[in-house]
Structure formats: structure tokens, C-alpha cells
């Protein structure tokens, strides 16, 4: 899977060094393209807490050569209200499980642990860290990329994988008109907690919040990812004490949700995001 060449007609430049970028790069390399990935940070590094990988994602990662042994914890998912009353148990699809050879639908993993495994699949000479993209110019035969450090590169295909505020996308399509969706996400993870049934995940709601948890693996060790979604708006202040804030939200929630507060290090195991979106592209 070497990608040291830079052959006209096969040159793919990818801006951004996150999981989506790396996945796209591996897919292009598998199909015989020459790939270079440009990340503005000193290294490609996943940020944030845990994530849920669904069956199609796992199948794609497996096609790149990633072993699914010990990759995560499969989960039986329940929807409940805050009092713990079951609304629905999500069934597995036996036909999908048999066809894919993957049990269940969702696997919980720590983002950084899984991203490291994916990065290990990337050949040397593909990733160019410390390259902040500025703009591109199009000619009759190629695309020329320009970077903050003065580096320039000609390519045949340019992939903008540099996030929701993508400079590539903005140049190609104009102002994305991002809008706040009205929610804030608190995403956390913690080590294993005894007495919670194995392979058991819950998505629960009251009239204002969602509070949920899934089992996960972190470097092969069991643990949990958990999150709270609350109403928000652009410019809403961040609580000075996130632990106290979330404790107030979850104080009347059915177990085991309140237990995750005690098991979480709020200095390094929780993140928050204001959720933005963009309008659908016009046809």
C-alpha cells in the first residue's frame, strides 16, 4: 500500500487529518491512487471522548486491514424514559449480522484508541503535518494547493475533510451559513463500573434532556461512554462547574446514570460541544 509516487492523473490531496480524512486516504490508496494528507496541527490526533461505531463503519475499517478483534464492545440498546421505563429494545438484524460477520449494530470505543489503530495502517510519506491549507487554484489540467508555510502542490483530486468550517468547502461553495441547532453535548467516559449488565446500553430522555450510556473498550480495557444533551443557544455561557451542572440534571434520573458522575474524572474525561449544522445543499 505504498503511496510515495505522485503520478499525474492519480494524485489525490486531502486537507484535514481527522478520522474521515484518514479513512478516505486509505480507500484511495487501496484503489491505486497516490495520496497526500495535509494536517495543520503538528500531528494527526483525535480529540474528544468515546464514539459508537456502527456495522458499516466496522466493515469499512476491516476492509482496510484493521482487525476487529477486541476493537470494542457490542451493545444491546434500550430506549427508556428518565425513570427507567423501557420504551423499546432495539432488535439486531440477523441477516445483517450473518452477511457482515459482525455481531450487533453498535460498538463503543474511545476515539483516540481507535484512531491510533487506523493511523498505523497509513504508509509512510502520506501524512504532511504542520501544513495549514489557505486556498486552491484550478488550471486546465490540475489543482494547485497553497499552504500557510509557503508549500505548494499540484493534484488531480482535492478532498476537503477539514471539518464543518472547511476552507476547501467554503472556497468551492461559498459561505456555509452554519446555524446553531439549539443543543449542547456533554460527552464523557469512565472506567468500568461493577454491577451494570454487560453489553447493555441505554438512550433515555425527559422533556428537555437526553442522557445515555454505552459500554466501550479503551486500549482493550472495559469502560463506559456516557453523554448528556441539553438545550442551548449560540453564546450561552459554559457552566463554571460542569460536574455540579450535570449532577443537577441527573439528580432524579434512574440508575445507573448518576453513577457515571462519580466514576468520571471531570478534568480529563469530559468534553462539551455546541452543535452546529448547515442547510442542505441546493440541487
Image (cartoon, rainbow, N blue to C red):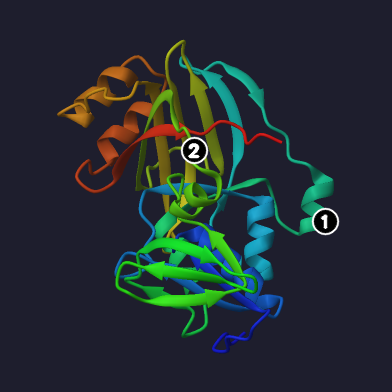
The percent position of residue 113, horizontal first and vertical second, equals 42, 62
Residue holding disc 2:
176
Is there a contact, CB below 8 Å, between mark 1 and mark 2?
no
Up/down of 123 relative to 156, above or below: below
What residue appears at the point 35 percent right and 21 percent down from the top-left corner?
232
Task: Identify residue for label 1.
Answer: 99
Horizontally, residue 109 falls left or right of residue 39, namely right
Q: Residue furthest left?
A: 240
Question: Which residue is more in the foreground, 205 or 208?
Answer: 208
Residue 192 horizontal/vertical position (percent) = 38, 47
The residue at the far front in this view is 140
Residue sticking out furthest to the top: 207
Q: Is residue 194 above or below residue 234?
A: below
Residue positioned 50% across, 71% down in the render: 144
Query: In which quadrant will I find the N terminus?
Result: bottom right
179 relative to 113, above or below: above
Secondary structure at numbered mark 2: loop
What residue lies at 49% left-to-right and 79% top-to-bottom? 126
Tell me if residue 121 can be seen. no
Tag count: 2
Alpha carbon separation for disc pair 1 and 2: 39 Å
Q: How many neighbours does mark 2 have within 10 angstroms: few (below 14), some (14-19), or many (20 or more)?
A: some
Q: Is residue 186 visible?
A: yes
Viewer-nearest residue: 88 or 123: 123
Q: Earlier in the sequence, mark 1 or mark 2?
A: 1
Residue 254, image x and y in percent? 42, 20
Residue found at x 71% / y 56%: 102
In the rendering, at what x and y percent does residue 231 appear? 38, 19
Eyeballing the image, is 135 above or below 232? below
Amino acid at each position: 500500500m505504498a503511496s510515495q509516487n505522485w503520478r499525474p492523473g492519480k494524485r489525490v490531496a486531502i486537507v484535514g487529518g481527522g478520522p474521515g480524512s484518514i479513512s478516505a486516504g486509505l480507500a484511495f490508496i487501496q484503489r491505486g491512487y497516490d495520496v497526500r494528507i495535509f494536517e495543520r496541527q503538528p500531528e494527526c490526533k483525535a480529540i474528544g471522548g468515546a464514539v459508537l461505531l456502527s456495522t458499516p463503519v466496522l466493515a469499512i475499517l476491516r476492509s482496510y486491514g484493521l482487525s476487529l478483534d477486541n476493537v470494542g464492545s457490542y451493545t444491546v440498546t434500550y430506549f427508556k424514559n428518565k425513570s427507567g421505563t423501557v420504551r423499546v429494545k432495539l432488535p439486531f438484524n440477523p441477516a445483517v449480522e450473518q452477511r457482515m460477520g459482525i455481531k450487533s449494530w453498535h460498538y463503543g470505543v474511545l476515539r483516540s484508541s481507535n484512531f491510533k489503530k487506523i493511523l498505523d495502517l497509513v504508509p509512510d510519506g502520506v501524512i504532511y503535518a504542520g501544513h495549514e491549507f489557505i486556498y486552491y487554484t484550478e488550471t486546465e489540467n490540475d489543482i494547485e494547493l497553497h499552504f500557510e508555510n509557503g508549500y505548494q502542490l499540484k493534484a488531480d483530486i482535492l478532498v476537503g475533510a477539514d471539518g464543518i468550517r472547511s476552507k476547501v468547502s467554503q472556497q468551492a461553495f461559498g459561505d456555509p451559513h452554519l446555524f446553531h441547532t439549539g443543543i449542547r453535548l456533554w460527552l464523557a467516559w469512565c472506567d468500568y463500573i461493577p454491577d451494570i449488565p454487560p453489553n447493555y446500553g441505554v438512550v433515555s430522555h425527559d422533556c428537555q434532556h437526553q442522557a445515555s450510556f454505552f459500554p466501550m473498550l479503551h486500549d482493550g480495557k472495559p469502560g463506559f461512554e456516557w453523554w448528556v444533551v441539553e438545550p442551548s443557544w449560540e453564546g450561552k455561557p459554559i457552566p463554571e462547574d460542569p460536574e455540579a451542572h450535570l449532577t443537577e440534571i441527573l439528580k432524579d434520573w434512574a440508575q445507573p446514570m448518576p453513577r457515571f458522575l462519580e466514576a468520571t474524572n471531570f478534568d480529563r474525561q469530559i468534553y462539551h460541544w455546541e452543535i452546529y449544522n448547515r442547510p442542505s445543499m441546493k440541487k
